[in-house]
Amino acid sequence: MPDGLPADWQDRMVEMIRGAEDVDDAWFAGGPVCSPLDQIEIYVRQYRLRLFNALVDEIPGLNALLGDGAEPVLRRYLLEHPSESWTLNRVAHRLPEWLAEQPEGTEAAVEMAHLDRAVQTGFEAASGVAIEPAALAGLPRLRLQPHVSLLRVRHDVHALRSAVLLGREAPELREGDFPLVVFRRGIKMRHWVMPLPSWGILDEIRRGSTVPDAIDAIFAKEWATADQLTTEIGQWFKDYAERDLVELDVA
């Protein structure tokens, strides 16, 4: 490298490579087969190739949904949102919100991006303390387990994503109302289409409501009848415990 580099040249070179600063070929001396620009571009191309591959690995659902149109969209996203993390497995973290503002950001595509992110986030999340179904009888204060995400989508993006991961032919998307919970069992991520009132209780808990307030809220929204609450709520809470969706909120 030439003399006279700024004191922070190492940090700024990282910024150049990740795309957050314009490349400055004056920092490089060149050689017998490479110009100064060629030298830095080698690092830039290698990094961006690795970053693109890491992004595709994080979003199998969205990549399949966009098909042949995926690559230009994803490369544009990486140019506008250079990685800010030391790890490559969070590169898609800002993708759903960004995609929602793009021409390619159909409702189904954005929903799939949220699902891909929920799976990735849940896989990395910590595990809370499991509780037995009997512990829920007294309606204690609860919170969602760290690995749990709730999504309510208008397309069955979960079915398409599952088919892709299992190597099956991708089905046509169906429209509807799909209250999803995304959660981890062992080392595998799962999704489950819940009954709307059961999902609604979890969503109220996510917002900080107590269990009685959560039940009152779904009743007020007319998501559940009094008969449903009498006959089905026990099964809903059993599901929460057996699938490790909630933990005691002791804070």
Image (spheres, rainbow, N blue to C red):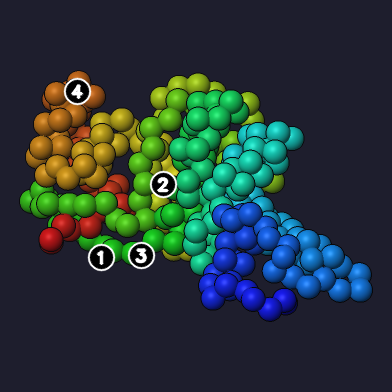
Q: Earlier in the sequence, mark 4 or mark 2?
A: 2
Can residue 57 be seen here? The reply is no
> Residue 182 shows which numbered tag?
2
State the separation of the CA atoms marked 3 and 2: 14 Å
Crowd around label 4: few <14 · some 14–19 · many ≥20 (10 Å): few
Q: Nearer the viewer, mark 3 or mark 2?
A: 3
Q: Quadrant of the N terminus?
A: bottom right
Q: Is the residue 29 above or below the residue 213 in the image?
A: below
Tell me the residue at 50%/38% (across/down).
98
Percent x, y of residue 175: 50, 21
Task: Identify residue for label 4.
Answer: 221
Viewer-closest of 10 and 71: 10
Q: Mark 2 packing: few (<14 Cα in 10 Å), some, or many (20+)?
A: many
Give the mark toward the camera: 3 or 1: 3
Q: Quadrant of the C terminus?
A: bottom left
- In the rendered structure, find residue 129 and report the number of the disc placed on it: 1
Dot 3 alpha-carbon crowd within 10 angstroms: few under 14, some 14 to 19, many 20 or more: few
Instruction: Point out the tag, 1 or 2, that comes first from the N-terminus.
Output: 1
Residues marked 4 and 2 touching at CB (< 8 Å): no
What secondary structure is found at the residue carrying circle 1?
loop
For residue 126, which numbered disc appears in the image?
3
Quadrant in the rendering for residue 207: top left
Q: CA distance from mark 4 to mark 2?
A: 23 Å
Number of residues whose C-alpha sits closer than 10 Å to that of mark 1, classed few (under 14), some (14–19) or many (20 or more): few
Residue 151 at x, y percent in the picture: 39, 37
Left or right of 162, for residue 186: left
Cα gap from disc 3 to disc 1, whole angstroms = 10 Å
Q: Residue at x 10, y 37 (%)?
A: 213
